[in-house]
Image (spheres, helix red, strand yellow):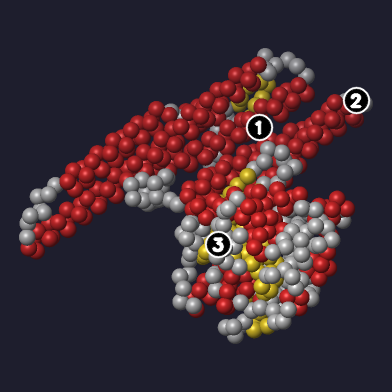
Amino acid sequence: MTLTVADIDRWRAEAVREVFQAATDRGQATLEASRQLRSLAVFDTWQGATAEARRHQNAQIRQDLDAHGEEALAVARAADKAADGIENVQSRLHRLRADAAQLHMTVDAQSNTVVPNATSSGPPVQSVIAEQQLQPRLDAILAEANGVDTELASALNMADGDTRIPADAGPPVGRRGLTPTQRESDANEERLGEERSRLRLRVDRLQALHDRLVAQTATDYHNGVVDSDAVSRLAAMGDQLTAAKNRLGELDCVDRALRNAPETYLTQLQIPGDPRSQVLAAVAVGNPDTAVNLSVAVPGVGSTTRATLPRMVVEARELQLEEIRQLKNAGRPTSVSTIVWAGYTPAPNPLDTDSPRDLWRTVTDGQAKAGAADLSKYLDHLRANNPGGHLTVLGHSYGSLTASLALQNLNAQGHHPVNDVVFYGSPGLELYSPAQLGLEHGQAYVMGAPQDLVVSAVAPLAPVHGWGLDPYGPGSGMTQLSAQAGVDPGGIWRDGVSGHADYSRSFTNAAGQPELRMSGYNLAAIAAGLPDNTVRLPGPPGGVR
């Protein structure tokens, strides 16, 4: 149920603070009792079975007290957060009401709208303009209030026992806690939810205002009145509505991507203020902080958060499952995290847009360099959170150039977070030797299909426009993996790549089940740290064509 302004007015932060204080006192007292019990040495000198039973019972009591104390502090933490939220929402609402009064407007507490007040005597258009200014602020306050209401309900339900207190509720308490990625993901998902709620309200309000202005403008026109200012405002509002819908669509796709696989984490979320810039995100399938093997897929030309992120998360899940299968067969730990990094903006596909400007952007490296700077930081961050994991970068198309430049940047700084890298469907890497990548304890691989025009027609031109050697030429120095149809070492038939977008996509096998192509099989083998499992091209590197 959506809250009203009247509900917000009835909130009392002081009452929630009382819950916080009571839970804090209880938690601290319980943990202190456990500490005192732990300090007793009355059973230390006892001998025999009775003494051992007493010591065991004492240890169990302490464990129960610790758990209860931590749960009480979790309730306190939730109540404190809810109380802070209440105070912030009510403060913002107070400021909005003051600003509305100066514009002869008021907040209707039942309908959640900004309307003219009793002193308003200006023309209707003036009220519409004031509403356009104030209503988005009210919508944002209501969106935040609904989030606070959820937090408040959770705190009160935990306090009275209606809801089980999770072991990982909130920041670490005592011996329990969340990993860095879990904490970051929780914060990013909370922000995602708040922004989606705010934008849904904004779209609804803008649509209503837009429709009213359309009707008013049409009426004026039929009455022989043409108001050029009103027409301009209508066009501007239409642009705002389109931008808000587009941004909401992007955020909805991020949310859908998180639901396209089990155990997903929103490891990165950037929502730019300029609506013309796309939302950037990274989604991990499996926890990268604890995974033995983790990989980062960097997409290429034409990839967007809205159009490709949900599908790429499905592909990341399929890659994870194939890695687990190979690791299980090898008797290795099956702890795997596969990450989709949509943390930069590659150029649109010129074949889709038919734009000379987009074609130029695909053969220049400006966006790759910008993306490489952010990818470098992201890879360093992954390594800091997981010092011992096997980290692989998987760069596709223009994303291979971005990945190559990121590794070269890191190497120049003396940072070597990555173990292995696979470049596939690559147009060029601005690379003359694999040593530039700084893979001191790993290897660089390339993979291409003869049917992929980027591999067969674009990559040979890399030296012409300063993108280094042809990645698939004899001088690249990188191991070439097969993207062609055949049987893998385990006897499973794998289809080959027939187009530029096929490398990570599955096909339907004879049993009617999705199966990774030979390219996907090889990506999984490298990402799992099983290079001996790969299928490689026979003969010289140039044989890819």
Residue placed most toward the observer, 359 or 492: 359
Q: For the residues marked 3 and 2, what is the alpha-carbon distance in whole angstroms?
A: 67 Å
Looking at the image, is mark 3 or mark 2 earlier in the sequence? 2
Q: Amino acid at mark 1?
A: Pro
Is 188 located above or below residue 499 in the figure?
above
Answer with left or right where residue 175 lies relative to residue 330: left
The residue pinned by badge 3 equals: 391
**What residue do we see at 44% from left, 32% from top?**
83
Q: Position of residue 525 (x, y in %)?
A: 58, 73
Q: Amino acid at mark 2?
A: Val
Regarding residue 519, the answer to whether it shows in the image is no
Q: Nearer the viewer, mark 3 or mark 2?
A: 3
Regarding residue 54, the answer to whether it shows in the image is yes
Residue 136, which numbered label?
1
Looking at the image, is mark 1 or mark 2 earlier in the sequence? 1
**What residue do we see at 67% from left, 14% from top?**
119
Q: Nearer the viewer, mark 1 or mark 2?
A: 1
Looking at the image, is mark 3 or mark 1 earlier in the sequence? 1
Quarter of the rendering containing residue 545: bottom right
Q: Position of residue 130 (x, y in %)?
A: 71, 24
Q: Secondary structure at mark 1?
A: helix
The residue pinned by badge 2 equals: 225
Residue placed most toward the observer, 426 or 324: 426
Answer with left or right where residue 474 lies relative to residue 106: right
**What residue do we see at 38% from left, 31% from top?**
17
